[in-house]
Image (cartoon, coloured by chain):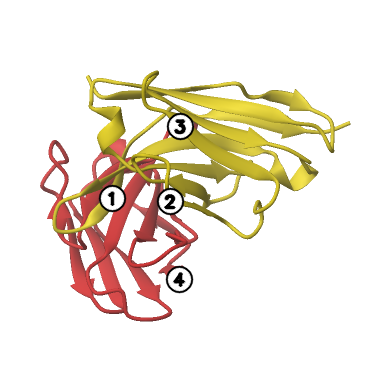
Chain colours: A yellow, B red
Amino acid sequence: EVQLVESGGGLVQPGGSLRLSCAASGFTFRSYWMHWVRQAPGKGLVWVSRINNDGSSISYADSVKGRFTISRDNAKNTLYLQMNSLRAEDTAVYFCAREGYSSGYWFDPWGQGTLVTVSS
Amino acid sequence: IQLTQSPSFLSASVGDRVTVTCRASQAISSYLAWYQQIPGKAPNLLIYAASTLQSGVPSRFSGSGSGTDFTLTISGLQPEDFATYYCQQLSSVPPTFGGGTKVEIK
């Protein structure tokens, strides 16, 4: 079964740091581009970052550029998101997702999400 | 690229035909996907390449459009279809999402 499982969320104070992990199974992780998407409470989906299959190409949303770092360990089948200088507006459920392609692109599957709460 | 979904909310009955529209601020060819999200769950891919049904998704879901205007149609709404639906463009980075359409029971 193709599966993504996030972990690492929690409560952190403004200005703090947190590292999220996304463990992949059931597919050849090193062959796929991966993404992080977040969803603030009661709000819509917002793309955060992406990384290509070997980690050589990375992009970020402007709102997190310079504060978040995406990375991957293909030997461990794991995607990461290092989040520094966290702000209240970073409070959200963070999802990892696999990018697929066949005549078009898509995100599938998605992990179950991990909640990050930034508050004093 | 901005995506504008309409309506943002709709109330419908079981068996109804429902249409959600998604308009892109610039042409995106057919690089559009649709997702369904049930509260407390992750988004689930329904359609990609504007009109290709993802494996395992019921045939009552269909998508159409290209360029800037797209539609998601549910033909014969079922109780499990009451959820929020999002469009997403994957033509360029960042891969943006529409604001969502919440489908509720009338």
Residue type, mark 1 in image: Trp
- Count all numbered tags in the image, as a single digit: 4
Residues under labels 3 and 4: Cα distance? 33 Å
Q: Is residue A95 above or below residue B106?
A: above
> Could you say whether the residue bearing mark 4 is in a helix, strand or loop?
strand
Instruction: Report the residue marked by disc 4.
Output: B4
Q: Using the image, tell me which numbered label, if any, was put on residue A106.
A: 1
Q: Furthest-front residue in view? A: A56
Q: Look at 51% across and 48% down and name the residue there.
A: A49
Instruction: Report the residue marked by disc 2.
Output: A57
Q: Nearer the viewer, mark 4 or mark 1?
A: 1
Residues under labels 1 and 2: Cα distance? 18 Å
Instruction: Report the residue marked by disc 3.
Output: A72
> Could you say whether the residue bearing mark 1 is in a helix, strand or loop?
strand
CA neighbours of label 1 inside 10 A, class few (<14), some (14 to 19), many (20+): many
- x, y percent for residue B40: 49, 30
Q: Look at 14% across and 58% down and name the residue there.
A: A103
Residue A68 lies left or right of residue B65; in this view the side is right
Residue A97 lies left or right of residue A48; in this view the side is left
- x, y percent for residue B63: 19, 61
Out of B15 and B23, give the one closest to the viewer: B23
